[in-house]
């Protein structure tokens, strides 16, 4: 029944997923050298074709301005020669990483002589739905190909011209290598219907990974029949404990909010112990104000900074990705943990304290993919964690959690070796 369904599915998403499925059969058999040669060829072709990519991107930027895209979104969309060189370098870094495919995870010999070996294998065909960042097109293709997976990409309308040109260049490069060009597919229809079609491609896609805002992720999770790895919205918190070092607390809090506010690991809410707040919060709020950060605070926060706006539950539940920060003064560690449990998205949470016992309690009790003691949440990133790159940051608990590097794009297969054993 499933085979019949696979062959009768129509529409661009199904057609391209079927081509990716056909390509994945041979792709999964390639060795590390062949895959690395393909990644290096892709990097070289991107740099060689930079002018054509920049021209396509210029058209996207002009359309974005006409459609009222914000300055921050236009910046994320923009490509120039330096950014293209950086994207190409990312492919070379992926090539330099160890290939997880074939890694032996378990090896045992049973009493009956059966030898059981569990190894990492490719997932197969990965579908990725994402928004207006053309660098994701290259990162996703590179990570998938390194792990022997074919990929079906569906980017947003804002970057469609850039994505089409980039994928054309990547496939042009692959045609000169052992990797079949059909292993990288781009859905050019950017309508909502094309994304919805991908959600139902069971048998053609092995897994879907949504990357983008909370609305996109929620829609995919709630409507997909294909298995989904949920990459998370980031309502991240930093808790300044009663025993926090003031200079360290200020440095971490400012970095977590201001260093790059548009990303998912930036802090959205600052929780402050009332004793620390009495001594240091007013000065810290003034520094945020000087840095252009809008403060939305609880009643105690607004006593210390009358210029701050009132924070509501809706604010605490919002991922701003902007120069806006919620601030709440809490009576103790327990209330900080309760607040995070209520409003957090299980992404990244931090405590700043010199009390090791309090720190350990926070790390153990807070439910998140990454928990920090005395360090900025901005480090939740595959490159910063030493994975070389990431396909996204998973906030769920099945299969993968946190920044997903190459290993997260593999499954396992059990190889059983015998010499005539039968079960009685």
Image: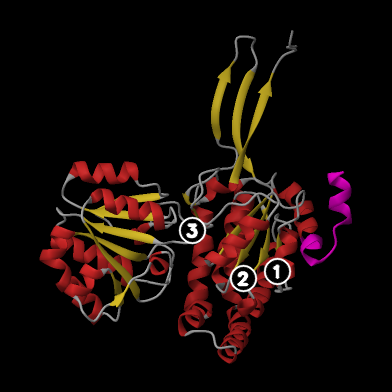
Indicate the quadrant containing the C terminus: top left, top right, bottom left or bottom right: top right
Q: Position of residue 390 (x, y in %)?
A: 50, 56
Q: Tag 2, which secondary structure?
A: helix
Mark number displayed over residue 236: none
Q: Is residue 181 rendered magenta in the image?
A: no
Residue identifier under label 2? 45
Mark number displayed over residue 93: 3
Q: Contact, CB < 8 Å: mark 1 with mark 3?
A: no
- The Cα atoms of the two marked residues, 1 and 2, are separated by 8 Å
Say which residue appears at 35% left-offset and 47% top-offset.
366
Say which residue appears at 41% left-offset and 62% top-offset.
235
Q: Residues within 10 Å of mark 3 (few under 14, many from 20)?
A: some
Q: Nearer the viewer, residue 107 or 91?
A: 107
Q: Residues within 10 Å of mark 2 (few under 14, many from 20)?
A: some
Q: Contact, CB < 8 Å: mark 1 with mark 2?
A: yes
Q: Nearer the viewer, residue 168 or 42?
A: 168
């Amino acid at each position: 029944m499933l085979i019949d369904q696979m062959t009768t599915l129509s529409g661009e998403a199904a057609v391209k997923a079927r081509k990716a499925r056909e390509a994945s059969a041979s792709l999964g058999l390639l060795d590390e050298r062949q895959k690395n040669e393909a990644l290096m060829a892709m990097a070289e072709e991107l740099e060689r074709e930079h002018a054509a990519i920049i021209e396509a991107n210029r058209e996207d930027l002009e359309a974005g301005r006409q459609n009222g895209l914000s300055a921050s979104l236009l910046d994320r969309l923009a490509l120039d020669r330096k950014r293209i060189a950086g994207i190409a370098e990312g492919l070379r870094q992926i090539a330099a990483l160890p290939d997880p495919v074939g890694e032996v995870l378990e090896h045992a010999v049973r009493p009956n002589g059966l030898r059981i070996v569990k190894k990492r294998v490719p997932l197969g065909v990965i579908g990725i739905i994402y928004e207006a960042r053309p660098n994701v097109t290259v990162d996703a293709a590179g990570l998938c190909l390194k792990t022997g997976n074919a990929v079906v990409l569906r980017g947003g309308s804002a970057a469609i011209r850039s994505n089409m040109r980039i994928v054309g260049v990547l496939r042009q490069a692959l045609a000169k290598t052992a990797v079949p060009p059909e292993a990288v597919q781009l859905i050019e229809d950017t309508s909502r219907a094309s994304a919805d079609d991908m959600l139902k491609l069971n048998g053609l896609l092995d897994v879907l990974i949504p990357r983008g805002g909370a609305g996109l992720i929620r829609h995919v999770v709630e409507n997909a029949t294909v298995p989904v790895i949920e990459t998370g919205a980031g309502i991240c918190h930093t808790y300044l404990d009663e025993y926090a070092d003031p200079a360290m607390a200020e440095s971490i809090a400012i970095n977590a909010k201001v260093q790059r506010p548009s990303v998912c690991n930036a802090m959205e809410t600052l929780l402050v112990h009332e004793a620390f707040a009495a001594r240091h919060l007013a000065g810290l709020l003034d520094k945020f104000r000087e840095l252009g950060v809008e403060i939305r605070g609880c009643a105690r926060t607004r006593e210390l900074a009358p210029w701050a706006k009132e924070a509501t539950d809706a604010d605490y539940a919002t991922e701003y990705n902007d120069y806006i920060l919620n601030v709440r003064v809490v009576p103790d560690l327990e209330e900080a943990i309760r607040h995070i449990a209520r409003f957090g998205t299980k992404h990244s949470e931090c405590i700043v304290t010199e009390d090791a016992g309090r720190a350990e309690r926070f790390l153990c009790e807070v439910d998140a993919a990454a928990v920090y003691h005395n360090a900025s949440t901005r480090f939740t990133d595959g490159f910063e964690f030493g994975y070389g790159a990431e396909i996204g940051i998973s906030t769920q608990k099945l299969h993968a959690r946190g920044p997903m590097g190459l290993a997260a794009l593999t499954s396992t297969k059990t190889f059983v070796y015998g010499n005539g054993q039968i079960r009685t």
